[in-house]
Image: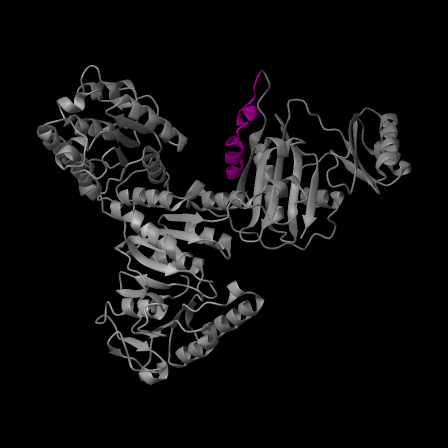
Amino acid sequence: MGRDLTALFDPRSVAVVGASDDPAKYGHAVAAQALRAPDRRPVHLVNRRGGTVLGRTAATSLTAVGEPVDLVVISVPGAGFEAAVDEALACGAKAVVAITAGFAEAGPAGLARQRAIADRVRAAGAVLVGPNCLGIADNTTELYLASDRFAPGGVALLSQSGNLALELQLRGEPHGLGFSRFVSLGNQADVTLVDLVEDCSRHEATSAIAVYAEDFGDGRAFAAAAAAAGKPVVLLTAGRGTASARSAQSHTGALTTSADVVAAACRDAGVELVRTPREMTVVLAGLAGLARPAGPAGPAGPGAGVRTRGRRTAVFTDGGGHGAIAADAAEDAGLEVPELGGPTQDRLRTVLWEQSSVANPVDLAGMGEQRPLCYADTVGALLDADEVDAVLMTGYFGGYAASEGGLGGGPAGGSVLAEGEARAAKEIVAHLASAAAKPLVVQSMYPGSPSCRVLAEAGVPVFAATEDAARALTAMTGRRGPVDATGVPPLPSPAPPLSDPGYHGVRALLSAAGVPFPAAREITDEAGLLAAAAEFDGPYVLKALHLLHKSDAGGVALRLADRDALLAAYREMHARLGAPAYSVEAMADLTDGIELIVGVNQDPRFGPVALVGLGGVLTESLRDVAFALAPVPARRAEALLRGLRSAALLDGVRGRPAVDVAAAAAVVERITTVAAAHPEIAELEVNPLLVRPDGALALDARAVLR
């Protein structure tokens, strides 16, 4: 059930310690907001000098209040912070919102102070938001403890930036977006992002959770909480493109960046990952469109009535240019714009005129000025078509009414057209309410026009930019129940630590888990080499061990036909490299095979993260790889492999047979499960994993301990 945050969001009473009449102090802004709802609960203002604050008598201390206080906001200089917390706990506080800064963000000493304070709060059975935060607000309980007002609505905003929160509010206003809650995360000394996501997922008035986070804390727990939320989670984060500061010793480590890890976690958890505040607003506006009433057939609510069966999108336009641009934007956003089938085209011809295009994009070709109601007829026909999952309407709609409203554009004397357009807007809304609802998104040159406002007020997302409309529609069509049918994979129980991180030790670890390898023996001299060669037939492979990248150093010799060739290769290689040990192996049959790479990198925030892709010596050059949180179930592994740019190679090209992708996926599951059970391994890699028509075989492996 998660932590009980009732005292944080719906306290019986509130006190602001550090309340002030000085507008330059944060205690002034918070106190002024707290007094917006004085009748909902007692609000006590505390200032050590006493007197009055904002026209109300201020207590000189929490103790002087004379009654228990459920929630205490502390905005005092750092030197007095611990004493204020202790007094709050002594007065029965069950929640503390710490505005005061100067803790973990100030260095090790501040971190130690912060940890000690959090320990005292938890020991008292209370919760702490912050320190170094900007307050909280809950519009559903009339709790206003932040410096700014947030318009009421269905979005819970959890942010590490106050200014970004304000920008999101400004950007959301034209779309009718409002907020159920706002929480400034601060340093997350006690109440974490995970705690808040879990609580907001249970909050009935919250339909979507928007997060701006720079520090996830336990990133894997965040992903799991988001996956289990049962409502959309939209994430904006910074620093995604920064590679790990640790010096990577494998292809996996070199290829894995913070951006890859965050993107993989979001995909696995079903989180909408965005790059800018504008994109976050667009996605939230699209998700809000999913909550429009479903009509008589179903209830309203987050996603109620909207059947997201797929991404087959009909683009509908009143101009060829807009249609072409919108079709490109839709496909760039991951939507499909297929040609419509014969029955749907025939249905469209009954409501359009001869010169209209009905293939997809569907183009009115000027009919809108002859009969504005054709907009509604066409939208209705497209939404009713079984082969259409969503509709993107783009172009001039709104322009006829805009000319009447003084917004510019529109044909001269367009009052008749404006009236017809307004009726069309109302009929579109009526169709959405009565039909089996599907996502509809509108891009208009005149998004603020009366006709577009009719659509927006009915829950249809309306945008000025084509790319925004396409991105919103992607968010609306991307919610398909359980994410990938698997979600965030649980970590296996830790296994005994790996005692031998050498090449053959790693092979033994993986072999015990069912990963197939060719026969191999470790040798240190010519006698051992000849003994190994007697155990299995050639051709042979010779590898110099304990080198970082054997192939680059000339430490791998392939296709050694017999013992004489093997001995000659050993003498040459040993004279050149002087390696302390070598591996003699049976040469695998490379015919019709494809080399893959499978690796796992331990991320400090998200734990084990897997990489799969095209392998061999060109792995880093080709960079055709995909990522997922480990362990990776075989079904997901196969989906990752088939999503590679080079996936066509797996099914056979130019006369080559298809390889056994299912066998490769099964091996991926075994490798990533081993890595996830060994947190002491920083990097585990099999490269190459040879996949042939008859199975998969690991040809090389390495591990790097933390």
Above or below 385: residue 169: below
Above or below 291: residue 118: below
Q: Position of residue 356 (x, y in %)?
A: 22, 18
Q: Position of residue 506 (x, y in %)?
A: 71, 45
- The answer to whether residue 514 is visible is no
What residue lies at 59% left-to-right and 46% top-to-bottom?
A: 673
Would you say residue 565 sits in the magenta stretch? no
Find the magenta span and give its range: 634-654
Q: Write down the quadrant of residue 504 in the picture.
A: top right
Q: Position of residue 132 (x, y in %)?
A: 44, 65
Between 635 and 192, which is closer to the camera in this rendering? 192
Q: Write down the quadrant of residue 330 in the picture.
A: top left
Above or below 531: residue 370: above
How many circles with numbers are drawn on the protein? Answer: 0
The secondary structure that most of the magenta stretch takes on is helix
Residue that lies at the very extreme toward the right in this rendered image: 527
